[in-house]
């Protein structure tokens, strides 16, 4: 049984001249996606809530440009796209990556304020970013890639706010694909599964504590619910984004694509 995926290479596509905007991209999946697009030759503009994380990401990756942005604030989103447009001259690809895990626990214990914040960041922000990006896309079209989650197609105990938000991303994606297809704009969602990283450890450490077991025991149980019995790497997610944004994905739209090692049930 494999508890961890093997190292993954970047998908060897060339995206020279593809102007890319990525939210929540100073760390984690977002940063790996940004680095991958930059390595493929694309001019990339990133945003993040954390000024410190953004500064570190830009310092470590000179090819990237970016600004601080709180995506729960629609005026901040407009300012971010104004900055991106000034830097890039337009937008060909939007990757709505910013998101939060939301409150964890039984529904009777959840704060409505925390639930509303989850929807504001995971859903409303994607609407706002899409609105701004479409205005900046060329007449020839473009691509929007929304990050959902395997929780956007499966039930997830004690994560009702997060699961609801991620199901919403899928509905938004499919509706927007219908709306924007005539403009040549493709819209797809990526549904990551159990991705190695800090968020995976945070979520499943909490569940392990609830169960009275160790994190490693919890992780072993989690991967048993996937066909490949493995977690996935951030580069796997980045590779799907590269494919969807590239000419190879030109006839793919309105899809919710799971990159999850075949997760069919949440423990």
Image (cartoon, rainbow, N blue to C red):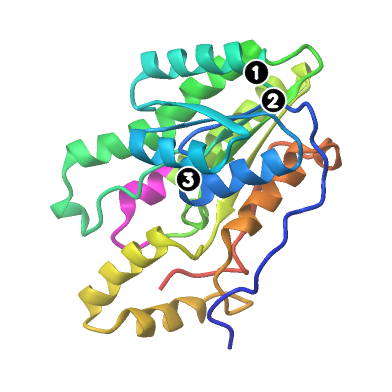
Q: Residues within 10 Å of mark 2 (few under 14, many from 20)?
A: many
Q: Which residue is tagged 2?
A: 19
Magenta range is 156-165
Q: Majority secondary structure of the magenta segment?
A: helix
Q: Secondary structure at mark 3?
A: helix
Q: Secondary structure at mark 2?
A: loop
Q: Which residue is tagged 1?
A: 88
Estimate the spatial distance between the alpha carbons at disc 3 and disc 2, rounded to whole Å: 28 Å
The quarter of the picture where the C terminus appears is bottom left
Check contact, mark 1 vs mark 2: CB within 8 A.
yes
Q: Nearer the viewer, mark 3 or mark 1?
A: 1
Residue at image x 37%, y 34%?
121
Q: Which residue is tagged 3?
A: 167
**Residue 141 appears left or right of 108:** right
Tell me, yes or no, if residue 38 can be seen here.
yes
**Residue 245 appears left or right of 149:** right
The location of residue 178, given as percent across then percent down, is: 69, 26
Q: Nearer the viewer, mark 3 or mark 2?
A: 2
């Amino acid at each position: 049984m494999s508890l961890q995926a093997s190292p993954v290479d970047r998908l060897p596509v060339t995206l020279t001249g593809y102007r890319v905007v990525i939210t929540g991209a100073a760390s984690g999946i977002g940063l790996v996606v940004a680095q991958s697009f930059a390595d493929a030759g694309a001019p990339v503009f990133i945003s993040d809530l954390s000024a410190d994380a953004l500064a570190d990401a830009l310092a470590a990756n000179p090819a990237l440009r970016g600004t601080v942005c709180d995506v729960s604030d629609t005026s901040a989103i407009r300012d971010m796209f104004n900055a991106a447009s000034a830097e890039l001259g337009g937008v060909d690809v939007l990757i709505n990556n910013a998101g939060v895990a939301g409150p964890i626990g039984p529904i009777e214990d959840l704060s409505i304020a925390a639930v509303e914040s989850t929807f504001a960041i995971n859903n409303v922000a994607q609407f706002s970013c899409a609105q701004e990006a479409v205005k900046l896309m060329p007449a020839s079209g473009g691509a929007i890639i929304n990050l959902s989650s395997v929780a956007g197609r499966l039930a997830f105990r004690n994560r009702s706010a997060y699961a609801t938000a991620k199901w919403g991303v899928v509905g938004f994606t499919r509706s927007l694909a219908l709306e924007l297809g005539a403009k040549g704009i493709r819209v797809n969602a990526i549904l990551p599964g159990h991705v190695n990283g800090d968020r995976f450890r945070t979520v499943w450490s909490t569940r392990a504590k609830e169960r009275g077991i160790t994190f490693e025991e919890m992780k072993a149980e989690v991967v048993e619910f996937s066909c490949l019995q493995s977690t996935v790497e951030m580069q796997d997610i980045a590779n799907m984004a590269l494919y969807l944004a590239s000419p190879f994905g030109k006839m793919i739209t309105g899809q919710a694509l799971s990159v999850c090692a075949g997760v069919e049930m949440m423990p």
